[in-house]
Amino acid sequence: QVQLVESGGGSVQAGGSLRLSCAASGYTYNMNCMGWFRQAPGKEREGVATIDGPGYRSYSDSVKDRFTISRDNVKKTLYLQMNSLKAEDTAMYYCAARGRSCYSGSSSDPGWYDYWGQGTQVTVSS
């Protein structure tokens, strides 16, 4: 089993920045593809960014050029640097992991992932 714990959420004004972290524990050898997802009230969970074991990254169009996903495999931590935040970025943010390459399946589909954190709230005021 893998346990994921997110932190770093909070309230910020539009144009500001936040850095989310996701600490992994347990059988972390079973993690390859990791991703950030978000879910706003009344909306479906959507993919934000993914990163493969070797470091290959992908982003949704809505956050490209504003957000950066990274991982520290020694610290077993996933990060999401969020800059130029907008009100529409307001959501609960979740990290997820699966023991396969992001390119082996539907890494943008929340149902593809095996492990999830409990989420951290991000609120952006305009």
Image: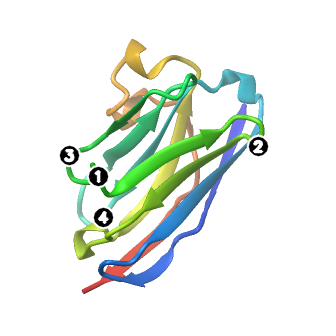
Q: Which residue is mark 1?
A: 65
The image shows residue 82 at horizontal and vertical percentages of: 42, 62
Q: Is residue 107 left or right of residue 117?
A: left
Q: Quadrant of the C terminus?
A: bottom left
Identify the mark nearer the N-term, 2 or 1. Answer: 1
Q: Nearer the viewer, mark 3 or mark 4?
A: 3
Tell me the CA gap for discs 4 and 2: 29 Å
The amino acid at mark 1 is Asp
Q: Which residue is mark 3?
A: 61
Q: Which residue is mark 4?
A: 40
| Label 1 vs label 3, nearer the camera | 1
* Residue at 43% over, 50% down: 68
Residue 100 percent across, percent down from the top left = 53, 17
Residue 78, above or below 1: below
Q: In what element is the residue under mark 1? A: loop
Residue 4 placement, left or right of 82: right
Image quarter in which the N terminus is found: top right
- Please tell me which residue is depicted at 26% across the width and 43% down the height of the picture: 60
The first of marks 3 and 4 along the sequence is 4
Q: Secondary structure at mark 3?
A: loop
